[in-house]
Every structure is written in C-alpha cells, then in structure tokens.
Amino acid sequence: MRIQIINGPNINLLGKREPSIYGSVIFEEFLSDLRNEYADLQIDYFQSNVEGELINVIQNTGFDVDGIILNAAAYTHTSIAILDAIRSVAAPVIEVHISNVHARESFRHVSMIAAACKGVICGFGLDSYRLALEALLKIKSV
Ligand code: DQA
C-alpha cells in the first residue's frame, strides 16, 4: 500500500512554530517513527508553502496512491483550488489538523476542502496523522 502525506504552509516550521499549539517535535522525526511503525507501507511525504505545488502533488499522486493524508494548513480555510483538486483525483483524501481548529479563531472553523474529503481528523497533535492512516487502512480493507 502506498500513502501520500501532504503538508501545507508553515508545517515545515513544526518544532519551532508556536510550540504551545503545535508541539515541539519536527515532522520528519514523527514521520520516521510512523514509517518504522508501519514498515509494510510506502509512506511518501511532501511539504510546500506554495498552493499550486500542493495541487500538483495531489494531481500527480492522486491516481496512483491508496490514500492521501492532507494537512492543507491555512489553505484549508481559503482554497477552492485545493477543493477542486481533491475532487478531481481517485484516491480518498483525509483532512487532518494538528490542533483542534474548532477551539480556535472562528476563521479556522471553516474548511473549504472538507466536503471533498473522506473525513476530517483534528486536535490530536501529530497523532492526527496516525489516526488518518488507520482510517485509510480500514477503508482499504473493506
Ligand atoms: C493547522 C490549522 C490551521 O488553521 C493552521 O493555519 C495551520 C495548521 C493544524 O494542523 O492545526 O497552519 O492545519
């Protein structure tokens, strides 16, 4: 099985960025643990601060992988282009957030992309990605 994780803007600063909200672990450390834990899966990773690059990777992987775990970060709340990209591909997409966006500012309560996603997981720190992976495994085993 092949899973694509895609992270949007500012997730590259995890560990340094607002640690009281996002924690102090860098994503690559978490990813290395996740890959060890799910050694039989191919887990590919891409991060960009550029909206179009996220769309390119959704398009370029979305017909080949078994699932996409997407933290579109702030683009979640603004991007119709990412919504359309998710709708365009075959792979199921799970929207994830590290923080509980519903417990934060009201502009974070709106997701432009959720309607195109299989489901949404937020608020569990980096474990949101692990829960999304488990959800994809369940979908694929049905
Ligand atoms: C985030 C939540 C977004 O509102 C925010 O813009 C982010 C990170 C999260 O993972 O909690 O950059 O997607």
Image (cartoon, helix red, strand yellow):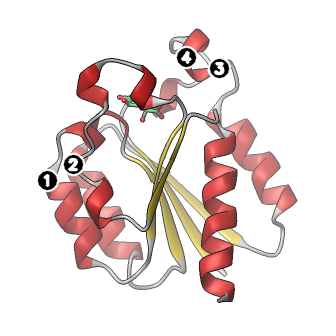
Q: Secondary structure at mark 4?
A: helix
- Cα gap from disc 4 to disc 3, whole angstroms: 6 Å
Task: Say which residue label 2 marks.
Answer: 112
Marks 4 & 3, CB-CB < 8 Å contact = yes
70 lies left or right of 82: right
Q: Which one is earlier in the sequence, the residue at label 1 or at label 4?
A: 4
Residue 55 position, x and y percent, is: 26, 60
Q: Residue 21 has which mark?
A: 4
Compare residues 75 and 137 and report the one nearer the observer.
137
Q: Which one is earlier in the sequence, the residue at label 2 or at label 1?
A: 1
| Ligand 1 closer than 8 Å to label 1 CB | no
Q: Is residue 119 above or below residue 91?
A: above
Task: Say which residue label 1 marks.
Answer: 80
Question: Mark 4, residues whose alpha carbon is within 10 Å: few (<14), some, or many (≥20)?
Answer: few
Task: Say which residue label 3 marks.
Answer: 23
Residue 104 position, x and y percent, is: 39, 19
Compare residues 93 and 4 and report the one nearer the observer.
93
Marks 2 & 1, CB-CB < 8 Å contact = yes
- Cα gap from disc 2 to disc 4, whole angstroms: 22 Å
Taking the view exactly as shown, the residue that stands out farthest to the bottom is: 142
Look at 74% across and 73% down and name the residue there. Answer: 41
Q: Nearer the viewer, mark 2 or mark 1?
A: 2
Q: Which one is earlier in the sequence, the residue at label 2 or at label 3?
A: 3
